[in-house]
Image (cartoon, grey):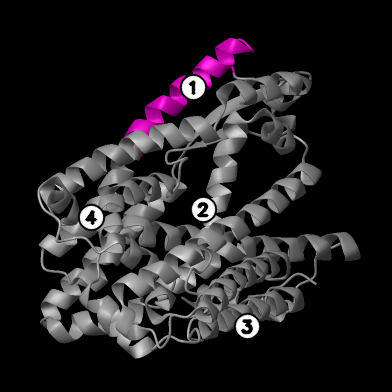
Amino acid sequence: MKELFQTFRNIFKIPELRDRILYTLLLLAVFRLGTFVILPGIDSEILQAKFASNSGGLLDFFNTFLGGAFARGAILALGIMPYISASIIVQLLGAIVPSIQKLRMEGESGQKKMNQITRYLTVAVTFGQAVSYVYYLKGQYPDALVTTNLFFWVSTILLVTAGTMFLVWLGERITDNGIGNGVSLLITIGIIASLPSAIIQEFQSKLPMIFFIEILALGLVTIAVVALTQATRKIPIHYARQMATSRYQQMGRGTASRQYIPLKVNSAGVMPIIFAQAIMFLPVTLLQVAGDRAPSGLIATLSDFTGFWYNFIFFLMIVIFTYFYTAIMIQPQQMADQLKRNGGFIPGVKPGKKTADYIDMILSRITLPGSIFLAFVAIFPAIAGRLGVSSAFSQFYGGTSLLIMIGVVLDTLQQINSYLLNRHYDGLMGAGKVTRNRSGIAV
């Protein structure tokens, strides 16, 4: 514990890192304030009350990610989600469209062009979703609208579109001048915003011992998700230029550097859950938007988020989408070609196609347990709900919310650790030797 507090003190004694953290916190506070700026012509109190009585489905899922801005009728009602959708579309196109594939291979200049394409596509996606949002409010919650004239339509669509693009700019500023990935942090803050109220409600409604068991179970699930996020299969590689020094290193007069290809057990991240959840929520959401009658039959089965058949189908879809997204994002042949160009090889495996087949075999083997574990994480909130945990609190027992939060926290901590290591490195290069003050920081 003493070392932990010492690390925090060290962080704030590094001016650049301290300024970046404070800058990030300031912009995140601006984001949270923006979720409370209500659109003109909307009665927010009526809208929130109506939305709470009809909660469930994809829209409620989005509202959780947006920190309640969707149900509040705020300027940031769509949040950063249109940008996420545009990014996913560009990533998928990058796997099948040759021109975008070429941009991905052009390094920094190609990445800038892809970012520009993503921004333009975000504007189009946001505009379309803004129109759907106004239409949804008019059809489902007419009592919450003060007016529905042409000015209300135009102003709402423009303000919501501008709000999303403002968040895109805010996320880029955090990434460039702050700490962590800006877009991911905005999503995480939106999710965490509902956590305190969920914990308080759960504590008030349960016996202390039951609440303690629930918190303990949440801690165990969190540890398991961290292990899933960090788990990798390391494939050792050698380079031809290292062979000349291998004898020297084997004689004990040098230390061989171990190099490897890290393949994550869960290479697809949270995307399979998002894809599967969107498809599972689609029939119910279309009925809600259309104002149709209560669901029945198969639609009713797909509406029961804690039911057996819903979670069984959800489980299978996540396993399938994990393989699908992994196959799109990781190209074994491309990795083998790059190794061959750099003079690298896997011990005991011939370069070229044999290497690609070997990487593909390893990837297929580790993806199976990874996909099954990911699917269990996705359905665990439903299991927690069946065991008596409230719906507001059970969503933090797994699924997209927990995976995103843990992934973002780990990524941010890694960046902070990199700054600490770079501080030591700069002190060594600048003074010729490392001197440390009482706090242990290299100067």
Instruction: Kindly tell me whether residue 57 is visible in this rendering.
Output: no
**Image coords of residue 433 (percent x, y):** 85, 62
Write the residue at 39% across / 46% down.
275
Identify whether 29 is placed above or below 86. Answer: below
Query: x, y percentage for residue 442?
Result: 76, 69
In the image, taking residue 196 as reference, residue 348 lies left or right, namely: right
Q: Which mark is residue 360?
A: 1
Q: Is residue 393 above or below residue 119?
A: below
Where is residue 220, by image quadrant? bottom left
Q: Name the mark on residue 217.
A: none
Q: Earlier in the sequence, mark 4 or mark 2?
A: 2
Front of the two marks 4 and 2: 2
Give the label, 2 or 1, closer to the camera.
2
Disc 2/disc 1 C-alpha distance (Å): 28 Å
Instruction: Give the label on residue 85, or none.
Output: 2
Q: Quick one: label 2 or label 1, which is nearer the N terminus? A: 2
Question: Mark 1 and mark 2 in contact (Cβ < 8 Å)?
Answer: no
Disc 3 marks which residue? 26
